[in-house]
Image (tube, helix red, strand yellow):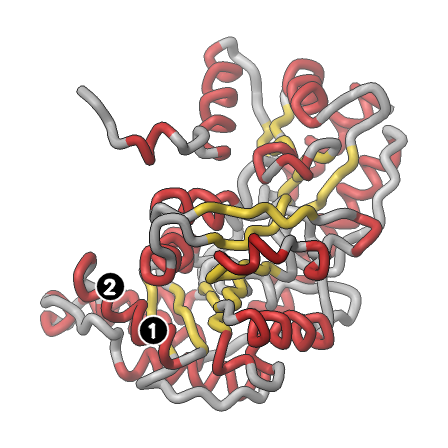
Amino acid sequence: MKTAARIAQLPPYLFAEIDRKVAQARERGADIISFGVGDPDLPSPPHVVEALVDAARDSATHRYPAYTGMPEFRRAIAAWYLRRFGVNLDPDTEIQPLVGSKEGIYHLPVAFLDVGDVALVPDPGYPVYETGTILAGGEPYLMPLAPERGWQPDLDSIPPKVLERARVMWLNYPSNPTAATVDVSFFDRAVEFCRSHGLLLAHDAAYTEITFDGYVAPSVLQSDGARSCAVEFHSLSKTYNMTGWRIGWVAGAPEAIEAIKRLKTNIDSGIFDAVQAAGVAALDGPQDHLAATVERYTQRRNLLCEGLASMGVALEPPRGSIYLWVPVPKGHNSESFTNLLLDEADLVAAPGTGYGPSGEGFVRFSITLSDDRLEEGVERLRKAFG
């Protein structure tokens, strides 16, 4: 059996490889603690679950949903954007619900890249920006991110010949995997750059609500001119602990939203209406769970930073996301340190090279495991390396 050439171009998906290593270790009887995947352990808010149950009992939700999403859900998204960012979106032309933001992030290159077109991709960055580009027939151009630049791309260093073929630029703040944050002035510069070069700016905003120490993450759509050249992906996964529900959206430039809508009407049948009703309840309902969630993550972040410091790894606590981007100890690279953690402490972390070549020298720790398992993991770090 011969697969398509595009499949051969894809690397193994990072988290599938992590799962394989964990399974092997568990087969030898190890009690593995995984810091590898950012999947919140905290439950979805009760009123959201209740909204799903109530809606699922209504047989009207059992039929095909609207391709463009429930009007009530689109209006709830628009109202949330206005409250949160002061951005007034048209729910009919500037918002498209998604089967989780990952789905839309993959499909955007299909809608905007022809064979040979270039997408500017952060390195290190969420792997789907690159793999989605490859599967669409485009060419990813990796924009190296470095700590001395605050993990921001040097836009002026992109070669003119690359920009001539570029159609899309990806950004992601607060960042996965680096946990870097930006202020709105960075988005102002990025929007101006994309407008001047005819690029669609695609911002993955999955972590804007998980921030610490008084930092408030901006939206790219707050920047002047952004709604003519930018879209923003968001998800209920991290904000409302709804990773398994698969519900999110893309918002922004009407021309881009229309193209994504046209694509989606040809490849999927939308989101179960009961899940969208739960999405309305999440966005319109009580938000008090979020402060408690952020406080819990703050405590976990601090505990893990202290544990890493005990083994000689100094780390400035990040201001956003659910990750710590940790420099490896002297004498190790990303892969060797990841293997050392597994062999010596039965701990799993994600090697930085899984997010791009510029991730070398780092590993990513997630803080989404339960408090007792995180405490046990920190204790193992101290015993094995302290």
Q: Residue at 52%, 12% (x, y): give it.
A: 29
Task: Choose top left, top right, bottom left or bottom right for residue 354.
Answer: top right
Q: Is residue 293 left or right of residue 280?
A: right
Residue 361 visible to an observer of this rendering: yes
Q: Is residue 52 left or right of residue 299?
A: left
Where's the C terminus, which quadrant?
top right
Between the residue at mark 1 and the residue at mark 2, the CA separation in whole angstroms equals 10 Å
The spot of residue 225 in percent (x, y) is: 56, 84
Count of picture labels:
2
Q: Residue at 68%, 64% (x, y): give it.
A: 211
Q: Which amino acid type is shown beneath numbered disc 2?
A: Lys
Q: Residue at 76%, 41% (x, y): give it.
A: 304
Of helix, strand and loop, which one carries label 2?
helix
Task: Choose top left, top right, bottom left or bottom right for residue 280.
Answer: bottom left
Q: Which residue is mark 2?
A: 264
Q: Check whether the beta carbons of the residues at disc 1 and disc 2 lie within 8 A of each other.
A: yes
Q: Residue at 34%, 55% (x, y): give it.
A: 114
